[in-house]
Image: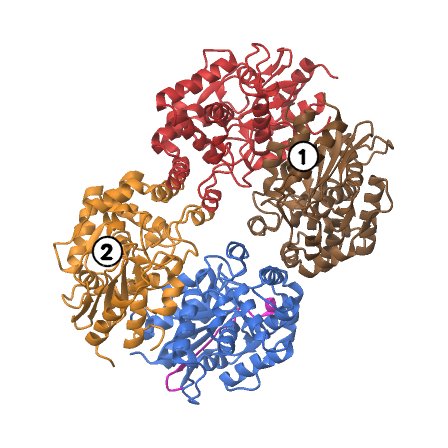
Chain colours: A brown, B red, C blue, D orange
Amino acid sequence: MPNLDDVVREIADEMRQRTDRGAVASYIPELARVDPGAFGLAVIDADGRAAVGGDADVPFSIQSISKVFTLTLALGMVGDRLWRRVGREPSGSPFNSIVQLERESGVPRNPFINAGAIAVTDLILSRHQPREALGEILRFMQFLAQDSSIVIDEAVAASEQRTGFRNAALANYMRSFGVIDGPVEYTLGVYYHHCAIAMTCRQLATAGRFLAHSGRDPSTGHLVVQAERAKRINAVMLTCGHYDGSGEFAYRVGLPGKSGVGGGILAVAPGRASIAVWSPGLDAAGNSHLGRIALEALTRRMGWSIFGG
Amino acid sequence: MPNLDDVVREIADEMRQRTDRGAVASYIPELARVDPGAFGLAVIDADGRAAVGGDADVPFSIQSISKVFTLTLALGMVGDRLWRRVGREPSGSPFNSIVQLERESGVPRNPFINAGAIAVTDLILSRHQPREALGEILRFMQFLAQDSSIVIDEAVAASEQRTGFRNAALANYMRSFGVIDGPVEYTLGVYYHHCAIAMTCRQLATAGRFLAHSGRDPSTGHLVVQAERAKRINAVMLTCGHYDGSGEFAYRVGLPGKSGVGGGILAVAPGRASIAVWSPGLDAAGNSHLGRIALEALTRRMGWSIFGG
Amino acid sequence: MPNLDDVVREIADEMRQRTDRGAVASYIPELARVDPGAFGLAVIDADGRAAVGGDADVPFSIQSISKVFTLTLALGMVGDRLWRRVGREPSGSPFNSIVQLERESGVPRNPFINAGAIAVTDLILSRHQPREALGEILRFMQFLAQDSSIVIDEAVAASEQRTGFRNAALANYMRSFGVIDGPVEYTLGVYYHHCAIAMTCRQLATAGRFLAHSGRDPSTGHLVVQAERAKRINAVMLTCGHYDGSGEFAYRVGLPGKSGVGGGILAVAPGRASIAVWSPGLDAAGNSHLGRIALEALTRRMGWSIFGG
Amino acid sequence: MPNLDDVVREIADEMRQRTDRGAVASYIPELARVDPGAFGLAVIDADGRAAVGGDADVPFSIQSISKVFTLTLALGMVGDRLWRRVGREPSGSPFNSIVQLERESGVPRNPFINAGAIAVTDLILSRHQPREALGEILRFMQFLAQDSSIVIDEAVAASEQRTGFRNAALANYMRSFGVIDGPVEYTLGVYYHHCAIAMTCRQLATAGRFLAHSGRDPSTGHLVVQAERAKRINAVMLTCGHYDGSGEFAYRVGLPGKSGVGGGILAVAPGRASIAVWSPGLDAAGNSHLGRIALEALTRRMGWSIFGG
């Protein structure tokens, strides 16, 4: 078994030298300003040791990675009733497609495409006012990451809100079917804000540890979710976590993972490690280009694929 | 860790008593004659010991499960060039949908929907005449299952060929885009015949062992495919092996698996076991209803989910 | 040639006796209150004589019929540049479908489906503030109908605005592609208000006369639009005026026409007459059930089909 | 009123000088050999006088224009029961789309898209053996065109049959839903042969006269179809005769018309004239580019649009 620290260092070096970096997301103006050359990687193993490389302590916009945590939170609030509003099948279409909603009575295919995540946010709002809901989401992230300094980047949230007409279309469309209940602008407001949480790779890998360890944070012993539920969130991440590139990610990396348009990916090696990687350039499916390549190298060298060696 | 023999026996008993069995496939007349009460389960662990329950030695039509083996064979023949003709993303639509083909220039989304499997069969035919190709596929199954008595059920093949207009539509459609090359009737003939292979759960679980053990059959030591490739076939099974129920199977069972409309499922617990289950009644997505429930019970009791305990 | 007054009277009598009336639109609460037994018919011939039957002087909500007039107004403002924002092909899908927008970069197929009419309203707003735009539309209707008492039913407009999530989805979706420019809520506000104009059959038939007479109102001699443009608006009405029932309307009635969900239809017999009919019950495609049947009887008895006798 | 002979001559001259000619269809190899510079126009007025220009006596492959005549023939055989198998709404999609069939249980939207015309041919085959059916179609064309020398171009038919995989997909797909009954290869064989009929503009304009004159051929007095039916065939031509360019044709030309991929268009000015035009270059929707422009000029100069002047 290779040494994890060595492997992480090697990969960070290799990625630094690559020139194929994909394109930084431009549709959210504020995100387009990020340094395309950034690369960070943090791996936290079962014993809690962190192996980090590159810009692992630089905060970035976690964007859709937040959907893993809002799903966890909403499942805790409403339980499996959540699945009446959201499916758990891959969508076979881009992250912001509306076609599927028309075909399936406004029920989004899974909680990780935009429509599904908006519906999950709306469920959280069924219990809370917008400001409280957002506070609860942020405190949950701080608690999991064991770092109360984590904040929401208001400039990013405002930038998305100004330009998020497509998400407004998805939300209004679901509202017309009764799949979401509350005022559309409240739901979208909370959605844009939790997507605008800024975290470092190290914080994110820490926050994801409960998914790698049967629902329990091994450092605190705290049970975040039942083991059964952690397992199932991992399953949804595997089949749906990378939009219409989920098959490719499973094929190449072989771990449950969730990407964000900010260039981050959270990946889970069950029983072994929680991993966060960040490189802002995206591939055609909207997932971090070097992030996926780095994770592929990591799982191959460490033998961590859930599909065998 | 519970005893595997006990668990298999318990599950077979429980399934025998259930009355919710789904509906036997009726669109292939010959398949509609099967006993809906049949249930078989066979698990072969890493040491080669078989735990079996119910009708584990009754042959059934493996149907689409054959697609795992034709994919393996075709990858061995043409290597990763195969992926120029077939994608590896979940389809987000039923097994015999043609809509996706129109949207994506005739390239099927993955090798496990009908269109994709027909394209894979066509690739095998690029190297062989139909009769030889079929012989090669059958010998491959016999070799893997270590049983030369395995045959093709000609009545089933003929029944499908007479009524398979939708598959003929898919094949002609792909032919119009040049995604398949050969005479459509040859390709369909071989396709229907390999789907009509009849096997028992025990034979099928034996044949699938290389996928659980890094490409190698542990009983013979024979390397069927490179470890890397076995891992990747498992990944495609996980994301695409149950048509538009793949997300649900991953969520509930947590293993790579491939279903057939005959009611069989082959599942792989990497490093641990190869599993075959058979119950003819299907759910709405066309997958064995009790088969899936039995596998869910098995992985939960044995702690075999790849997504964590 | 039969006498027009007799024919109109006969048809009004026949329609009064029919019990198959379709279903009154229920998705706009305020519209659901209308008397389902109402039936009105008004025909104004080339000489300006009106033949009327039934409730021809009872006002009803013209709804999508207003789209003919906003199209006329917008063409007058921006000319054929309008067609950069809106197509003129039948949609092959229901009136409020969003699928087509995704496939075609947010450009609606024609100005008579909801998305297209919203885009036309947005063009009018490029020249006016919302309040002025609405005033201009209303004055245009009053001018054409030669009746300054025509008003907007504010209760209907408010009812639609409260429940119009699907239109909000369409508008936001087009906004995301830049097909509409202005603030979405302004555009929708004006759209709901012009749809809520209340008119009688007699007023509506009067207002439509310019379309039957080469763009000119024969009673005043006023040229509303160029002859070429009137002809072309008629063509778009024929191919697109009844949503996904446009083919059926052409097949049975054989006149350009535009329906509204309030149960009205405006139809044009070029060179001969302008016709308005009203019966609130709708068919499956969202068009007035008896309205279409009455028009079919009218064109057959009068020999007015544009497709020959 | 301008002189028809002068107008036809002028248009033929103007078209000869144009250099924008669209692209000759290449997907049927045999059709790709035609001279792209050819242009023919024939107009036969109510009195039977022919005004011709350009290559009006050069035969070309009528292709989909034949669908108007097979529809007429099939309606004569099975009456309005035909509409149980085929709709009469515009498709909103290209001529050979299969998506619509999946959405609507295999029932083609109208008799003029490929799928619909194949279904119509299959209905004719429910009464005849293939050879007889083809004989009947050909004799019908010869009778209407008053020219027994009209033949099928076997080379074109054979060329289409060899390469017609997409049509084979459509036919098999409909067969899977029971929308067509007979052996798929028979139906396709007859379909390719009637599309391969070769006619001149003069012959085609003659054959179309019954549609312009209430179902009756004015030169012989023979009633081909009831007036009601002729009117309705015209309506379907108007809404569906140019595939996904039908709205554009109605908007610009304002006549019922049917195009063929060989570059021909048959158009009908009810009560006035039957018109055939031919120019092999096609526009993006698969319709004759100069053919449409010539017809637009003709209807404008003669004031023949059915939408008014």
Of badges 2 and 1, nearer the viewer stands 1
Q: Give the numbered dot on residue D35.
A: 2
Identify the residue under disc 1. Answer: A14
Q: Quadrant of residue A43?
A: top right
Relative image position of residue C76 (x, y in whole percent): 49, 78
The residue stretch that appears in magenta? C31-48
In this view, the residue farthest toward the front is: A17
- Amino acid marked by disc 2: Asp
Is residue B222 positioned above or below A190 on the image? above
Residue D214 seen by the camera: no
Give left or right: position of B238 versus A201. Answer: left
Packing grade of label 2 (10 A; few <14, some 14-19, many >=20) is few
Give left or right: position of D58 versus C168. Answer: left
Is residue D189 positioned above or below C57 on the image? above
Q: Quadrant of residue A72?
A: top right
Relative image position of residue B134 (x, y in whole percent): 40, 21
In this view, the residue farthest toward the bottom is: C220
Label 2 secondary element = loop
Relative image position of residue D132 (x, y in whole percent): 18, 44
Is residue A98 positioned above or below B1 on the image? below
Pick the front one: D30 or A72: D30
Chain to which mark 1 belongs: A
Label 1 secondary element = helix
Q: Quadrant of the N terminus of chain A?
A: top right
Residue A109 seen by the camera: yes
